[in-house]
Image (cartoon, rainbow, N blue to C red):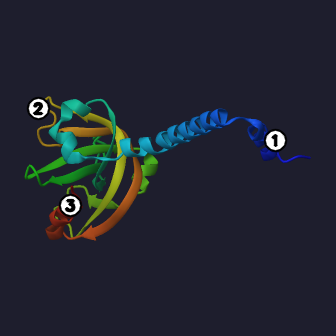
Amino acid sequence: MTNWLSCWLAPLADANKTKRALLNGLTFGVCLALAGIVTFPDRRKSPISLCEITANPERYAGKVVRVRAVISRDVVVGAPEDFGIPEASAFAACTARNDRATAFVSLNQASRLGLTPNRRIWRDRTDVASFNLSEGIIVGRFEPHEDGITRCLTPRYEFANAVLESLISTTTVSPERALAWVESKSQ
């Protein structure tokens, strides 16, 4: 049995220099194209900041986006009915605008279970001793809600059908330190 490489290269031994140069150039071009195909999508899919999205909602409306943000999962125990409000929210401190960006995040079940919940008892007025906050990358369809009525006391933005792509870190902070932690994790 002959070596497959020697069968492949045997015709090249007899080929002239022009054919070899052409074949080498073609091989180099194919390798360069493959390298570009492999590395280009990674650069294109880098996460967008929540500040960028809320500053330009018309650009991202209805599109699936990757977002890096601080995420909080809030669970209310003992409520009389389900109000249909997503359990998770995304936050970012926009230092360039001296503003804060917030959005609801409708996570799938598996992604929700990956976040440590903040549990509250329905109508319990006691102060919360600590918050569980996570930094992560979510992928979901961005939906601005600009009606001005139903979203007057809630975030104007939502990430629908979202998935928690990666969880970078989770921490437990006091209410006094929560804002400082969000600012430290924001772009």
Indicate the amino acid at tag 3.
Val
How crowded pointer 2 is (Cα within 10 Å; few <14, some 14-19, many 20+) is rated as few
Instruction: Specify whether residue 178 is in view.
Output: yes
Q: Do the residues labelled 2 and 3 touch (CB within 8 Å)?
A: no
Viewer-proximal residue among 94 and 3: 3
Viewer-proximal residue among 146 and 94: 94
Indicate the amino acid at tag 1.
Cys
What is the spatial separation of the Cα atoms under label 3 and label 1, in whole angstroms? Answer: 62 Å
| Above-or-below relation of 178 to 69 | below
What residue is shown with label 1? 7
Give the quadrant of residue 177. bottom left
Point out residue 112 in the picture as x, y percentages from the top left corner. Answer: 40, 51
Point out residue 93 in the picture as x, y percentages from the top left corner. Answer: 16, 55
Of mark 3 and mark 1, the one earlier in the sequence is: 1
What residue is shown with label 3? 182
Q: What residue do we see at 15% from left, 31% from top?
A: 146
* Left or right of 125, for residue 40: right
| Above-or-below relation of 95 to 81 | below
Name the secondary structure under disc 2.
Answer: loop
What is the spatial separation of the Cα atoms under label 1 and label 2, in whole angstroms? Answer: 72 Å
